[in-house]
Amino acid sequence: MTVGGLDLDTWTIVLVVAGGFVAGWVDAVVGGGGLVQLPVLLLVPGISPVQALATNKLAAIMGTSVSAVTYYRRVGPDLRTAAPMAATALVGAFGGAALASHIPASAFKPVILVVLVAVLAYTLARPRLGTHTELRWSGNGHHWAAAGIGLVIGAYDGLLGPGTGTFLVLACVSVLGYAFLPASAIAKIVNFATNLGALLFFVPYGAVVWGLGLMVGVANLCGGYLGARAAVAKGSAFVRVVFVVVVGTLICKLGWDVLHG
């Protein structure tokens, strides 16, 4: 089967579709779906790294759209937080995508690895972190903090990508003071904006493999819907457990990348 100029056999199609579904579920619960989806897309014969990154964004935005709507209907995230964070995240993601071909990912990975180890230690040392919403600021201070978080993490998403949703959840919990469940709901709205910002660069650039992206995107959408429902049904305690597992996996992945150059 030929998709976007790429020859895909049956097993490759099964692999990318399964990867998209799992990525959508994980991403909807606590972020980090790119840890699954992007490496799977890089296994497609003939695809370039930029094409894989761009196609990953197309598939991911389909999943984040349905999980964001599901969270909005069932959790009711605070749009006064989500809106400024999403706006600056979109701008940051566009800028990050534009820099993606100029700055090597290896330059950032050691720093991100150290931050993640500190995050995991902090989360494990504070078992009550994220169980209840206790906002750190009110008024304009809260909105400026949210906007700053969106800009920084949006730029990271456009530049690298994997783990963006996890970083958003972490920031909403540890910096802003939300519980894990509403943090995940806000993160999905912002993650939709970061994916859109990156696509605004990648689509005119011609890097998206549309047929492959839509195929994986449908699977991601299904996984995102089920993941969001699972998170809402099981609450913040469940999201916290998945968060710890995903952060641990991200540490292992980045640690491997750093050690092997």
Image: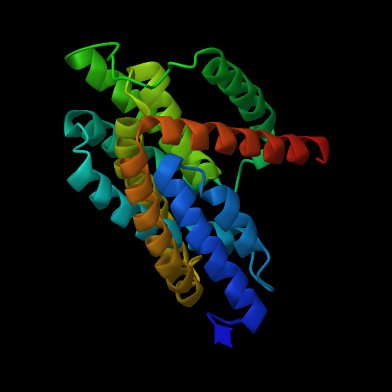
Q: Total of numbered circles in the picture?
A: 0
Q: Position of residue 100 (x, y in %)?
A: 56, 47
Choose top left, top right, bottom left or bottom right for residue 16.
bottom right
User: Which residue is outermost to the front?
Assistant: 234
Q: Is residue 39 left or right of residue 140?
A: right
Q: Position of residue 15 (x, y in %)?
A: 61, 69
User: Which residue is outermost to the bottom?
Assistant: 1
Q: Is residue 83 above or below residue 204?
A: above
For the C terminus, the quadrant is: top right
Choose top left, top right, bottom left or bottom right for residue 74.
top left
> Can the viewer see residue 8?
no
Residue drawn at the location 57% of the way across and 61% of the way down: 52
Residue drawn at the location 54% of the way across and 50% of the way down: 34
> Can the viewer see residue 191?
yes
Residue drawn at the location 46% of the way across and 73% of the way down: 215
Q: Is residue 30 left or right of residue 9?
A: left
Residue drawn at the location 56% of the way across and 21% of the way down: 119
For the N terminus, the quadrant is: bottom right
Colour option used:
rainbow
User: Which residue is outermost to the right?
Assistant: 260
Q: Is residue 78 above or below residue 104?
A: above
Q: Is residue 210 above or below residue 80?
A: below
Q: Position of residue 42 (x, y in %)?
A: 65, 62
Q: Is residue 156 above or below residue 101?
A: above
Q: Position of residue 66 (x, y in %)?
A: 30, 56
Q: Nearer the viewer, residue 18 or 97?
A: 18
Q: Is residue 4 left or right of residue 105?
A: left
